Amino acid sequence: MERRQLHVPPRTIMTPGPVEVEPRVLQAMSNSILGQFDPSFTFIMNETMELLRDVLETKNHWAYPIDGTSRAGIEAMLCSVIEEGDKVLIPSFGRFGYLLTEIAERCGADVHFMSCAWGEVFDPEEVIKEIKKVRPKIVAIVHGDTSTGRLQPLKEIGFACRENDSLLIVDAVATVAGTEVKTDEWLIDGVITGTQKCISVPSGMAPLTYNDRIEKVILERKSIEKGIASKEQLGRNNTRRRIQSNYFDLSQLQDYWSPARLNHHTEATSMLYGLREGLSIILEEGLEQRFARHRLHENALVAGIKAMGLSLFGRADSKLPTVTCVNIPEGINGDAVRSMLLDEFGIEIASSFGPLHGKIWRIGTMGYSCQKRNVLLTLGAFEAVLLRHNARIHVGEGVQAALNVYKSVEKEEISI
């Protein structure tokens, strides 16, 4: 077989993840490798923890990344907290609620699943009513589900969990650094995110944070492993089990991220450089300014889509600011449109899952991909491809509508 030099084609990535990476992040990742106990490297670890606290809007002591994709962080959090037989309430409004369910069931949880129609979210009172009925140890919920492009309000749910002594664990993979995630203010006990979306770092790390309520559970389970648990900690039936996973054991991971630096795994050096730089960029821009930028480009994209004569999927009042779901017009092959966008224009948008596959396109405006150039290029190319597929659209109006949105904010101090 003939060997050839690696060739990576240029792309404009407008999916709900992964997204384009900040150039400074790529540069940071090209630095030389340090040993995982080198003082210069542990200094970077400490810096990263401080930056994460600021981005996640928390005073929690524990804020660090899991080496692995977002799912690794979700699994680490759930596996470290769920014990066999624990009641776990999972309100699901899209595909990723089912992921939380599968992981919880693998941990032996007694899962109480509630769902609503895809394209909608829960009235917080529905969830609160179920919390009072089930009295779960844990409520695990997605904040922004990219499969449906919906955003679930969490503040009231957080207060209800605290009042009912339930732990609230949130998958905020699609929302951190793109829209508000107020960890402490909303009384969230554990938050998991990912590098490959609004943080604009390559896929491969799952930053998370958790408070002392979750740490208490983790440390009690650790004491079982060491054989020093009290009868009270073990429970009446002595059924409490130690954490089954070694790699995803937060009690061991926090020892590595503590000043003790107890060896657990070899840290992903270059990825940590990238995460540290990506978090720095977010805070340099400022969280409020960054959220405003995401809203601006979302508004321009939505205006362009509607001006073409296309319709959006889902309830408008629960739309996720970082993902726009577009209904595929009748008679149009959605996959063929996506393929032509990629092949002819180098622009990637996404299909969807389950009952929505073939019915909607999903366009992401996240992190570094969330910029004026990308929005205008995507709208222009999208129109051209739809015309080639004989779609009935309003020609020449999509890009103009987006430009009108940008024109209306030119005098404001929003970087576009």
Image: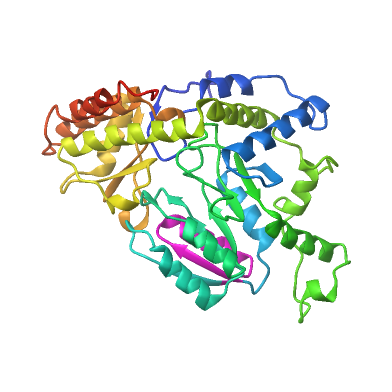
Q: Residue drawn at (76%, 81%), measured in percent from left and top?
A: 237
Tell me if 231 is positioned left or right of 159 in this view. right
Point out the stretch of residues depicted in magenta: 87-110
> Residue 39's x, y, as percent?
82, 27
Q: State which quadrant residue 213 falls in.
A: bottom right
Q: Name which residue lies at 89% across and 66% down.
A: 228
Q: Position of residue 9 (x, y in %)?
A: 43, 22
Check the image and name the residue furthest to the bottom. Answer: 237
**In this image, 386 relative to 240: left or right?**
left
The answer to whether residue 306 is above or below residue 224 is above
From what the image shows, is residue 163 above or below residue 365? below
Residue 263 visible within the image: yes
The front one of 335 and 142 is 142
| Near-viewer residue (376 or 170) | 170
Residue nearest the viewer, comparing 355 with 205:
205
Q: Give me the residue at 83% from left, 42% from top.
A: 263
Which residue: 47% across, 23% down?
8
Where in the figure is residue 290, as x and y percent of width and height?
Answer: 45, 32
Q: Nearer the viewer, residue 378 or 40?
A: 40
